[in-house]
Image (cartoon, grey):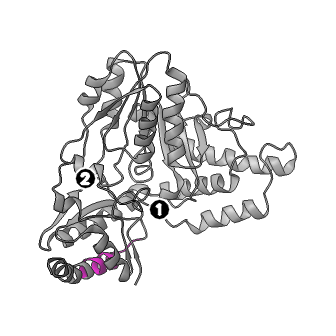
Amino acid sequence: MEVYFDNSATTKVYPEVRDIMLKVMDEDYGNPSSLHLKGVQAEHYIKDSADIISKVLKCMPDEIIFTSGGTESNNLAIIGTALAKKRKGKHLITSSIEHASVLSVMAFLEKEGFEVTYISPDSEGRVRAEDFAEAVREDTILVSCMHINNEIGAVQPIAEIAKAVKKKNPDVYVHTDCIQSFGKIEVNPKKLGVDMLSVSGHKLHGPKGSGFLYVKKGTLIRPIIYGGGQQKNMRSGTENVPAIAGLGTAVKLTMADMNEKMERVMSLRDKLIEGLTALPDVYSNSEAAPHIASISFTGVRAEVMLHALEDKGIYVSSGSACSSNKRRESAVLTAIGLDRDRLESTLRFSFNETNTEEEVDYAVKTIAELLPVLRHYVRG
């Protein structure tokens, strides 16, 4: 039996996504910048996907910039703001538990002369809007905070943060990384009060190498890729039409009955947490996002449990997929105050709409059998 519980790392594409991408590559393969019929056909796919996404976000299609994924979207939002507003100030604010595609950019900007304030979370991984507002200064140009944490699923109060920050300094831009929240909970930039919003396609059954950045009309950011001036000069380079078409299709399918699907996903998550935490010395670290369970199996190193589960056909993660091949202590788990044993024994289980109760039962049963064996081996 194969059980895939690593959907926060990536998801399997919908069959419809695969089909539309093959059609674009095989039949409608023109360059969208070309003036002939093949180019016009290709351009239609881009417009159609922008229309689909803008209807979901309740924004205008020209507020969507297609990118290669969440990392590029985050880079464009943060570096683009820094370049555009550096004369007004060089102070940025973020949380200490952001994804590497935010924290690494902040570290880069610090080397370029910018100052960054890092807000710490509470023991449940949530940051406070008041802490962000308190950190805002006259020279602050950007606040960036993720919507759902990718490791433990903590849901951040983005609307409260944006309101508090803009009350103190209306000129500050607010960006949110919605890579783990889009398609899982409601994401509406106007309700959230944000100026920019990042999304990745392969987290919602779309293709890898696809994503977008929502940029509110009137928000001034500078491009970080120059060339032919595609996408209104904001992201030069011939558009990846197959990926964009696949992304639009994935968004459309993901959003169909999203609330019902996520209620079912949450019931599976709860069933897994209940079953696992009934085992000796097993702890849940967060129960916020509908699709993520962070579980500590004290007495067994995360990598050992991960590979033991892999041998049984169960696939999980030991942290953020973007850095899990370079195992190091999790900044997120450290920030919420886990002790050494729990830090080193935590796995992430992440669900999608195709997971089943049978898979959860198999995972719980398998782990119940593995735990005493692995713990005995460690002690030995």
Mark 2 lies on residue: 333
Q: Amino acid at mark 2?
A: Leu
Residue 144 shown in magenta: no
Q: Residue at x 31, y 70 (%)?
A: 303
Distance in Å between CA atoms under marks 2 and 1: 21 Å
Circle 2 packing at 10 Å, graded few (<14), some (14-19), many (20+), is many
Compare residues 19 and 122 and report the one nearer the observer: 122
Question: In screen coordinates, is 233 left or right of 169?
Answer: right
Q: Nearer the viewer, residue 223 or 181?
A: 223
Q: Earlier in the sequence, mark 2 or mark 1?
A: 1
Q: Give the vertical position of 75 relative to 280 (above or below).
A: above
- Residue at 23 percent across and 46 percent down: it is 335
Q: Which residue is mark 1?
A: 10
Where on the picture, by quarter, is residue 26?
bottom right
Residue 49, position in %: x, y? 63, 48
Tell me the magenta residue range: 355-365
Contact check, label 2 and label 1, Cβ < 8 Å:
no
The answer to whether residue 55 shows anywhere in this view is no
Q: Dot 1, how many residues are within 10 Å of its Cα: few (below 14), some (14-19), or many (20+)?
A: some
Amino acid residing under circle 1 = Thr
Q: Quadrant of the N terminus?
A: bottom left
Instruction: Check disc 1 and report its element: helix, strand or loop.
Output: loop
Horizontal relation, residue 163 to residue 200: left or right: left
- Horizontal and vertical percent position of residue 311: 37, 82
Residue located 42% across and 66% down the image = 353
Q: Determine if the magenta segment contains residue 361.
A: yes
Residue 257, horizontal then vertical, whole percent: 45, 58
Q: Which SS does the magenta portion mostly show?
A: helix
